[in-house]
Image (tube, helix red, strand yellow):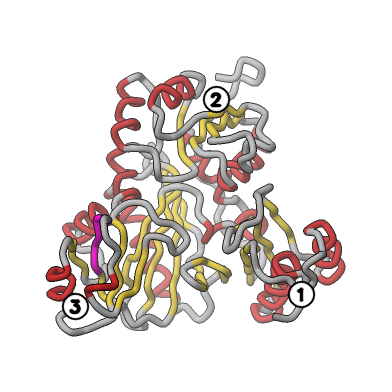
Amino acid sequence: MDTRTGLPVVGMVGGGQLARMTHQAAIALGQSLKVLAAADTDGAARVATDTEIGSHTDLDALLAFARGCDVVTFDHEHVPTEHIRELVKAGAVVRPGADALIFAQDKRAMRERLTASDVPIPRWAPVRTKEDLTGFAHGNWPIVVKAERGGYDGRGVWIIDGPDGAPDGVDLIAEERVPLLRELAAVVARSPFGQVAVYPVVETVQRDGICVEVLAPAPGLDGDRAVQAQDLAIRIATELDVVGLLAVELFDTGTDLLVNELAMRPHNSAHWTIEGARTSQFEQHLRAVLDYPMGDTSMTAPAVVMANVLGGRPAQNADMSLDERLHHMFAAEPAVKVHLYGKEVRPGRKIGHVTALGDDLEKVRASAARAARWLSEGGEER
């Protein structure tokens, strides 16, 4: 408990943009967000005064960090499961717990659990040899192979045309390549009390395995299908005993909704909620892990579009600084909201996002794309 405010201290392991934006939400609530960052250059470490430097794989660092927290949560899923269990043994309150988080950490465990629960997912199997791959494909190449653990933004996922295309030295699962219309995401928050709050279902647009755009609500999604996706997210959150945010990534095949991945933390597919919902996902995550009543998830505008700003793209004006690009972007799109993460620019890295709101989806989408191009490429045209 923070003796100055009388309010609980939330500890977030990981110092990236999710912790940075959670810190911003905590400020308005009067909460103290304590951050365990890998380095003082991490995005959250640049803004959160109560930051400790340490590795999420160092049990001693985790134990020391947790001693000053009323509840511990995460901005990524990479804390070893056994370390989370040790934190709980030492008296820490950890949300989500290890028994839930394992299904976001381990793709094989997640698919085994969802299969047992009759949750619709693509056909899959664990594979260890070329013969396993050939048997799984049964002549229907290409297939998708994924690392059982790790992987993010397209890393740890390979589409292969034959058994020789799989990486060596990695525990893999194989998955059929699903013919899909688009990808969707359903985000739900759940408290220890069991209260849930679900956001409108969104469409996520991917490029090279990276989410580049989110459209809220998902355009043209039938109302019954939207409720089906939301009910599925609530069911998974409840059955897995998730506390905090759960993002359920879905394949929309036109006839079915298939679960692709789970994330148990604030998620890129819900960044739009900062301006586009009555309660942002970051505030909602804090409410959930603190067992506060959930906030209103209704939208603040009929159409909201978030576009990620990716680093490393060839700029039209290579000598134009990010600050200069920001000037041009604001002049071109004064209503668009900008979130930059304080990150070093690297190819394909998410260095920020922009959000546009309005009544007409296509106009809103064009504004968001234009703003993101200015920040990423230094111009309006590709």
Q: Above or below — where is 366 with respect to 86?
A: below
Badge 2 or badge 3: first in the primary sequence:
2
Of the two numbered discs 2 and 1 in the rendering, the one whose residue sits closer to the viewer: 1
Amino acid at pointer 2: Pro
Amino acid at pointer 1: Gln
Q: Are marks 2 and 3 in contact (CB under 8 Å)?
A: no
**Residue 380 location in percent, x, y?**
76, 77
Classify mark 1: helix, strand or loop: loop
Badge 3 or badge 1: first in the primary sequence:
3
Asked which quadrant contains residue 322, the reply is bottom right
Q: Residue at x 34, y 82 (%)?
A: 179
- Give the residues in magenta: 170-174
- Farthest top residue? 3
**Residue 138 location in percent, x, y?**
15, 81
Query: Could you tell me how far apart the alpha carbons at marks 3 and 1 are, in whole angstroms?
Result: 43 Å
Would residue 59 be counted in the magenta stretch? no
Q: Which residue is mark 1?
A: 316
Amino acid at pointer 3: Ala
Asked which quadrant contains residue 62, the reply is top left
Which sits in the foreground, 349 or 269? 349
Classify mark 2: helix, strand or loop: loop
Q: Which residue is mark 2?
A: 8
Quadrant where the N terminus lies?
top right
Residue 292 is left or right of residue 170, and the answer is right
Task: Give the main secondary structure, helix, strand or loop, of the magenta stretch.
Answer: strand
Badge 2 or badge 1: first in the primary sequence:
2
